[in-house]
Image (cartoon, rainbow, N blue to C red):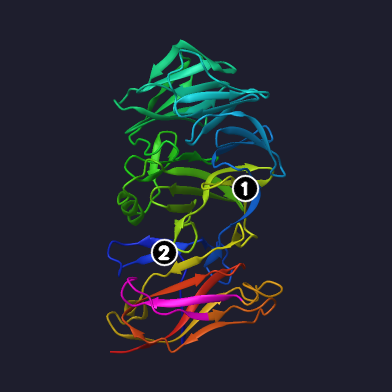
Amino acid sequence: MLVPINLTGGSYSHKSLPISAQVTRNFWPQLIDDPFAKGKYVLESFAGQKLFGTIGSVGRGIFYHNSLLYRVAGTSLYSVNSSGTHVLLGSIPGTERCIFDAIGTDIIVVTERKAYIYNGSSVSEVTDSDLESPDSVTVLNNQAIYDGNEDNFGVSDVGDASSINGLNYASAESRSDNLVRVYAFDQVVYMMGETTTELWWNSGVGQPPFDRVEGGIVEVGLGAIHAVTNTKENLFFFGNDRKVYAVKGSTASAITTEPLVRTFQSYSTVNDAIMWSMNMRDQDFIVLTFPTENKTFVLPIGGQWFEWSSGVEGSRNIANSYTYAYGKHIVEDYSNGNLYELDFDTYTENANAIVRLRDSAPLHGGLFGAPGRTLFMNKLEIILETGVGINGSGQGSDPVIMVSFSDDGGKTFSTETWGSIGKLGEFQWKVELFCLGSFTSRIIRIKTSDPVYYSIVDASVDIEIGI
């Protein structure tokens, strides 16, 4: 008799792999909130990437403002129109990643402890002697706020990010730590230090016209200057304790699982982490990349973390920056001058194959009322959308799903067995595998690489209980 099993879920690896060695890569695990749906859970292909525009230098960040996309690539600032065409605007020296904001039509760019302004016709460095070598900038109520030396921050004149009065400085010093990043959200500026975060509001009086929010302290600092973002509802950041936090006001809640925190704590370098948020198909996603560690993780808010990778070895995704522009989700390649559009109807990454993988939670006798017993798997039936092959010949015309097993807690896997999911229009196709041996605990690995849509709903097994 076929017994339903759940193959879906997010990445969740316990320190003891036989307990859980789950990996989800380039699949979006979803809980279907519909009592009449065929299954409660689904693994769906995550968005692919198609070329939007390119330039000959490596990108350092992108920013959308007043209906125009801006980017720094190499040592130049460009505008990029809706066709992906680049127009040179001026020079931004250096090689490091940039932080952007804007006042009116002026674009502010901070990088390598200097600030630059594009005023619509030219780029100039902010040379006001009162500016204290900033690492970041944010804008609130038409004033630019820059971080300064140690725990200082400075506030520009209203409407002019290039003019900073030396009296308009204050210190975020409720706790003694250096200021890492200033970030405005929900009419408050978060002064994000190495070990604590303070909330300041624009009171409109005094020099500077900002005051600390009463009780506005978050007892966690920022772990990486580029690892903070927000949705409409919450601020998110990567903490100095290597947890990811969702913040509302001064209340911070960790949203990372224990296994994921353990993974982050094993990394040698995290201060180059990058984070952004994006809303696709009415779902908010938080993206977190560790460039040195070569890994990218994604959290659908309200869902489970999964890996987002490029290539065949589970490396970080090539996306390095993000913005929403011209009705498109635009990302920047970390290794070249390419811009891509993220698209759920694209099943390749700049025409390259996307390898998708899911290692299930372990199957064991306890799930079948026979803990510790040997199990014989006579049949595995995978339930997914079939008949999705592409027109013509070549890869994707007869797509397959590759299945293998681990009976040692995810340390090694068997030789892959391939099952066809049907050529275009073969909607009655079923994926069935037979005579799959015995085990006491088994992880099922599903892998795909064809450029077609995958939607894995569920699975069933025919299990015989042994001794």
Residue 51, given in percent of the width and then of the height, sits at 64, 52
Q: 464 above or below 78? A: below
Q: Quadrant of residue 457?
A: bottom right
Numbered range of the magenta stretch: 399-418
Kindly tell me whether residue 206 is visible in this rendering. no
Mark 1: amino acid: His
Question: Which structural element holds mark 1?
Answer: strand
* Residues at marks 2 and 1, CA–CA distance in whole angstroms: 26 Å
Q: Is residue 175 left or right of residue 276?
A: left
Q: Out of 270 and 466, give the one closest to the viewer.
A: 270
Q: Which residue is mark 1?
A: 329
Residue 57, given in percent of the width and then of the height, sits at 57, 41
Residue placed farthest to the front in the image? 56
Q: Which residue is mark 2?
A: 23
Q: 187 above or below 354? A: above
- Residue count near mark 2 (Cα–Cα under 10 Å), binned few <14, some 14–19, many ≥20: many
Q: Out of 49 and 190, give the one closest to the viewer.
A: 49
Question: Which structural element holds mark 2?
Answer: strand
Mark 2: amino acid: Val
Task: Examine the structure image and report whether residue 406 is included in the region drawn in magenta.
Answer: yes
Residue 386, given in percent of the width and then of the height, sits at 62, 76
Kindly tell me whether residue 103 is visible in this rendering. yes
